[in-house]
Image (tube, helix red, strand yellow):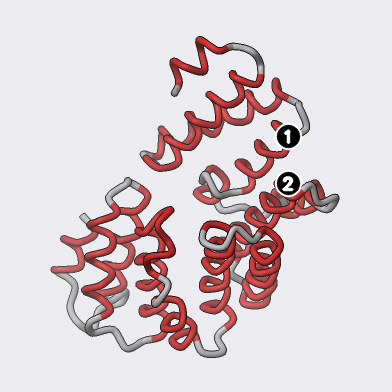
Amino acid sequence: LGLLAARHTPADGTPGPDERRLTAAEDAITAGEQDLARDVAREVLTRATAPGERVRAWMAVIEAAGQAIGEVDAVFPQALADAGDDPRLLALVHYQLAWRSLVVQGDFAQGREEAAHAARLAARAGERSTELLALAFQAQAETLMGHPGAPATIQRALQEPQDPRVACHHNGAGSSRFRWLVMSDRLAEARTTVTALLREVRRRGMAESEVHYLRFLAETELHSGHCGRALELS
């Protein structure tokens, strides 16, 4: 529907046709249609000149790569160049650089620093959704590092105002809190948390998040000694 709207939007419309295409690409990622998202974003990049549209398109290309983020390394310098000195756009790029540090380099400390930097930039720009994602990443990295600041960062990520989509996203604060609960051996709370998150992402049709939460629930059951249930979920 987003792509259909884009085709019927005048070139001087507000929002413009490419802005609608980028929203469609982001919706495609949510629905698990990575190939479609990447194709739409690449198409927009062939003609977009506005920094905001270009950076959003680069972010869609990176998101569509998933765990193969190392395969789109060449995107990062281009995205940084397009972002210029705009804190709103730089926050988006540094958030993805945090993921690159973790997934490609296995460097939790660097990932944490990139995420904290992204959160500060987003806060300066008043971009709450990006700030929340960056704080959630920082909290997850701190939890996995055994960093003593993890609980405080989780609380910052859970403060109002919240973005409903970020709140239930598999990279959001709820997910970070779940990870901390599991690693703190608070399994009953972890199960309640992830069950509620799973219910919400199913309601919203967030395919990738649903896969993650099923896996998290299986992990919780395994830690609880419920091996049959864990196997069933897996």
Measuring from the top left, give residue 44's x and y in whole percent: 25, 76
Residue kind at label 2, given as amino acid type: Thr
Q: Amino acid at mark 1?
A: Met
Q: Position of residue 154 (x, y in %)?
A: 73, 49
Q: Which residue is mark 2?
A: 143
Q: Secondary structure at mark 2?
A: helix
Q: Quadrant of the N terminus?
A: bottom left
Query: Which residue lies at the image location 51% right of the left edge and 78% below the top edge?
Result: 89
Disc on the earlier residue, 1 or 2: 2
Which disc is residue 124 wearing? Answer: none
Residue 63 position within the rendered picture, expressed as x and y whole percent measured from the top left: 40, 60
> Which residue is at the far front?
105
Q: Residues within 10 Å of mark 2 (few under 14, many from 20)?
A: many
Quadrant housing residue 201: top left
- Number of numbered discs present? 2
Query: Would you place residue 186 above or below residue 20 in this image?
Result: above
Mark 1 and mark 2 in contact? Answer it, CB < 8 Å: yes
**Residue 8 figure quarter:** bottom left
Q: Nearer the viewer, residue 207 or 24?
A: 207
Residue at (57, 26) in percent of width and height = 219
| Residue at x-position 70% and y-position 46% | 144
Left or right placement of residue 61 versus residue 178 in this view: left
Q: Which residue was labeled with disc 1?
A: 183
Distance Cα–Cα, label 1 vs label 2:
8 Å
| 203 w.r.t. 111: above or below | above
* Residue 147 at least partly seen: yes
Residue 37, horizontal then vertical, whole percent: 28, 60
